[in-house]
């Protein structure tokens, strides 16, 4: 959304950002054209940013924005001769009182942006733009692509939504499973990109993970009895609780085994555990609940040596059966190494080497387990290979540092050996 002039009162920008998806949802419901509605809402937000600091915030800011956006869209319709009949209809209609008064269709907008008809990359970009309120430039910076490229991606996504004829409504019971699966997966990916950036100079992007948590809270508020929605929110909170200890003063990566656990956010941990407890009481376990349970075990260990690796190994086994994801096997290999020794972990890695060939995390985990096993030369080679393949600079620095340290130990064996922890 437009950020508004720098002279806006401190609360105006936050208010506009919070209202933007609600207003866009209402205008889309009114006109049915995603692109036209977004343009109109952007103009309304800009008008609010210009007028509200001088004239004061109206009694119903949401209604003001909706009325303004609808008028702007109607003006645009009038200027388009090819849409004459739509113009005449729009000119005769007022904004329904129920829409202006309090109807919030943000969740419908979220489901539209995450429709299975869209590619994963398009769904993420469209969600952050339309529902999260991030500008195209901000999204482009987050994913390290040119702004023009991101603008094209978002534009294509909006056109695909329009062409698909997706009805602007919440999915019914028969559609919920498939549609919610797409929504939760997109939110999961946005959170992961914010918590552990895949590329660029920053270890983490708080704005992305924070936005994922905010949107997941909204879905949970609408579906509090859905175990997987609750599980995903619990997973995000339990993971985000460790954020304060993940990076050093210079932004360098601090792996889990070396983090100062006194810095972990106890409030988020407590909320995550409470959500998880409720979700797992429902009987059927899903992938997000299992991941949240693993995160809870890590969070509940006062010291790294108190971690219940045996239980984590069991949970990763269940998760692997459920998803068949090779990354889960990679994590299970670490748990197996911690529970039964590095050779057990290395054996599991062999089973996914083909599926993850060329991925830096395969080399990073293999290097870690080889170091635990005392094979410094092989570990050194894999740390270097992992560092060459990662595109995140803090992770690259960490892996390079591990390699340099092992190189020094190999030249001077009497210095001892300390196993590397994984983040």
Image (cartoon, grey):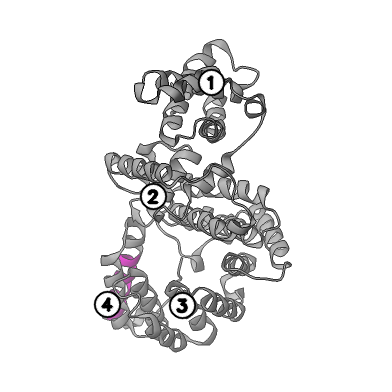
Whether label 1 touches label 4, CB < 8 Å: no
As rendered, which of 340 and 9 lies closer to the eye? 9
Q: Which labelled disc corresponds to residue 381? A: 4
Q: Which residue is mark 1?
A: 9
Q: Residues within 10 Å of mark 2 (few under 14, many from 20)?
A: many
Whether label 1 touches label 3, CB < 8 Å: no
* 401 relative to 302 in the view: left or right: left
Considering only vertical position in the picture, is 311 above or below 248?
below
Instruction: State how far apart marks 3 and 2 are (Cα).
Output: 28 Å
Q: Position of residue 282 (x, y in %)?
A: 72, 67
Residue lying at 45% horizontally and 69% vertically, measured from the top left: 422
Q: Position of residue 155 (x, y in %)?
A: 35, 40
* 213 relative to 283 in the view: left or right: left
Q: Which residues are magenta?
A: 399-410
Badge 1 element:
loop
Q: Residues within 10 Å of mark 1 (few under 14, many from 20)?
A: some
Nearest to N terminus: mark 2 or mark 1: 1
Instruction: State how far apart marks 2 and 4 are (Cα).
Output: 37 Å
Quarter where residue 359 is shown: bottom left
The mark lying in front, picked from 2 and 1, is 2
Q: Position of residue 262 (x, y in %)?
A: 60, 58
Badge 2 element:
helix
Q: Which labelled disc corresponds to residue 329? A: 3
The mark lying in front, picked from 3 and 2, is 2
């Amino acid at each position: 959304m437009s950020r508004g002039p720098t002279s806006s009162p401190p609360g105006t920008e936050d208010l506009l950002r919070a209202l933007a998806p609600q207003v866009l949802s209402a205008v889309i419901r009114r006109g049915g054209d995603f692109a036209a509605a977004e343009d109109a809402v952007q103009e309304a937000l800009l008008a609010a940013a210009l007028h509200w600091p001088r004239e004061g915030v109206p009694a119903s800011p949401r209604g003001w924005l909706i009325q303004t956006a609808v008028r702007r869209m109607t003006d645009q319709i009038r200027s388009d001769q090819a849409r004459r009949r739509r113009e005449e209809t729009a000119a005769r209609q007022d904004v329904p009182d129920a829409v202006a008064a309090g109807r919030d269709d943000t969740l419908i907008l979220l489901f539209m942006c995450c429709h299975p008809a869209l590619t994963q990359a398009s769904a993420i970009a469209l969600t952050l733009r339309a529902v999260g309120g991030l500008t195209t430039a901000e999204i482009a910076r987050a994913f390290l692509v040119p702004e023009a490229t991101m603008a094209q991606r978002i534009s294509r996504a909006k056109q695909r939504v329009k062409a698909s004829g997706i009805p602007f409504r919440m999915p019914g019971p028969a559609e919920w499973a498939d549609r919610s699966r797409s929504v939760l997966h997109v939110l999961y990916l946005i959170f992961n990109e914010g918590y552990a950036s895949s590329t660029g100079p920053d270890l983490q992007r708080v704005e992305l993970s924070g936005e994922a948590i905010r949107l997941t809270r909204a879905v949970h508020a609408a579906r509090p009895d859905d175990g997987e929605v609750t599980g995903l929110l619990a997973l995000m909170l339990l993971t985000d609780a460790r954020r304060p200890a993940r990076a050093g003063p210079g932004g360098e990566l601090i792996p889990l085994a070396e983090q100062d656990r006194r810095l972990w956010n106890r409030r988020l941990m407590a909320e995550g555990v409470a959500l998880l407890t409720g979700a797992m009481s429902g009987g059927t376990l899903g992938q997000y609940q299992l991941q949240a349970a693993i995160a809870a075990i890590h969070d509940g260990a006062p010291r790294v040596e108190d971690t219940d690796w045996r239980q984590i190994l069991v949970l990763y086994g269940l998760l692997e059966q459920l998803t068949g994801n090779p990354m889960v096997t990679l994590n299970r290999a670490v748990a197996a190494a911690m529970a039964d020794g590095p050779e057990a972990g290395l054996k599991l890695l062999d089973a996914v080497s083909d599926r993850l060939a060329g991925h830096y995390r395969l080399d990073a985990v293999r290097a870690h387990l080889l170091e635990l096993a005392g094979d410094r030369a092989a570990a050194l080679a894999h740390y270097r290979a992992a560092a060459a393949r990662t595109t995140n600079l803090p992770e690259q620095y960490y892996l390079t540092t591990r390699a340099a340290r092992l190189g020094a130990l190999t030249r001077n064996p009497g210095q001892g050996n300390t196993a590397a922890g994984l983040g």
